[in-house]
Image (spheres, grey):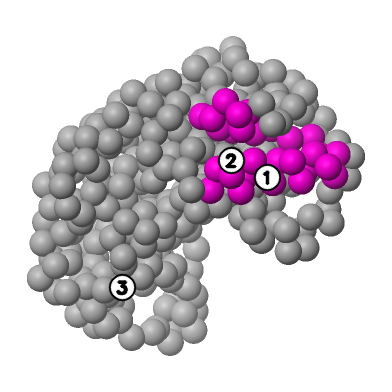
Amino acid sequence: MIDQTRLYQEIHEQPAVIERLLRDQRGAVTELVRAIRSREITHVVIAARGTSDNAARYAQYALGARNRLLVGLAAPSLYSVYQSPPRFHRSLVLGISQSGKSPDIVAVLAEARRQGALTAVVTNDPGSDLAGEGDVVVDLGAGEEKSVAATKTYTAELAAIALLSASLGEGPEAFEALEKVPAAVAGALSAKGATALVAERFRDVRRSIVIGRGFNYATAFEIALKLKELTYTMVESYSSADFLHGPLALLEEGFPVLVLAPSGRLLPEMVSLVATLREHRAEVVCLSDDAEARAAAPQSLAVPTVPEWLSPFTMVVPGQLLALQLAHARGLDIDAPRAIRKVTETT
């Protein structure tokens, strides 16, 4: 039974995990904010791999758009392979890793400490080697994640980043919006009936595209990763802008495309994209909280409405459920996909 799998259970733990992190890690994030302000930090460099790298993409938008910080993703090979690390100057170096065990991510943080930079770690293992390199550690507190595919640790990482953004801002509005996220994620879980229908329709699909932009550029990458891991489908992720610069040529009749279209500044662009995709006879599934956007696509999945900067929490859930249900429809091992392990240590 699908509801007996560890992945199903962990997906449904997400509202409680997010609520707990927002409650228990406020002190650690406040400490980090004090250090950022006292050192007059202007840049953030993030080291991460896999799912955590997608959380880092969210941080580029959350900390960039809301807090005016320049956020870049580290190239860990510069530290662990080429041993030619860049110089950190007035930077926060942030390591994001569920396990905290990957040597190349640890190497980035270790070099940052050697240079005297401010370091912080977001991890589900506060006793890990990576945590040992952090001046401040934010504990995801997600509990053991037994399924190979990460779900609850991913949204917990989003919560840590969103909490940091809110704490760096001014006024209570951001915190008030954050407090509503667990309930919104619980609401997004009600999409499992609709996602099961999409999964059955896409049962024989072997290639697909996921398109998002802005805050949900990260979500496009994360949904694509879950579909690759769990269903062995070749799935590419694009921003809507990049997709029109060449990859549009991939489209042919019946080509499946998932479009992420939450309310916000990018909604008109995404609705226009849906129309373009339909002109090219693609099979479009639109994920949105906006009724008109959903009506523009032949298939759609509804999500609860939250502020745009928090929409990655709700938008990723239907993608997780779709990957889970498509794997189930294909008779695959949901909790232990072939060839991959829970912890991957790269150097």
Q: Residue at x 60, y 29 (%)?
A: 292
Q: Residue at x 51, y 29 (%)?
A: 289
- Confirm whether the magenta stretch covers residue 269: yes
Q: Residue at x 14, y 67 (%)?
A: 37
Nearer-N-terminus badge (3/2):
3
Say what secondary structure mark 1 lies in: helix
**How many angstroms separate mark 3 from mark 2 (CA)?**
29 Å
Q: Quadrant of residue 231?
A: top right
Q: Is residue 47 left or right of residue 137?
A: right
Q: Which residues are magenta?
A: 266-294
Q: Residue type at mark 3?
A: His
Q: Residue type at mark 2?
A: Leu
Residue in the foreground of this view, choosing between 80 and 157: 157
Q: Nearer the viewer, mark 3 or mark 2?
A: 2
Q: Which residue is mark 1?
A: 272
Nearer-N-terminus badge (1/3):
3
Q: Quadrant of residue 313?
A: top left
Nearer-N-terminus badge (2/1):
2
Residue 344 against residue 91 in the figure, above or below: above
Residue 47 image point, x, y percent: 40, 65
Q: Nearer the viewer, mark 1 or mark 3?
A: 1
- Confirm whether the magenta stretch covers residue 288: yes
Please say whether residue 56 is visible from this viewpoint: no
Q: Which residue is mark 3?
A: 43
**How many angstroms separate mark 1 from mark 3 (CA)?**
34 Å
Quadrant containing the N terminus in the rendered view: top right
Callout 1: few (<14), some (14-19), or many (20+) C-alpha neighbours within 10 Å? Answer: few
Say what secondary structure mark 3 lies in: strand
Residue 318 image point, x, y percent: 55, 29
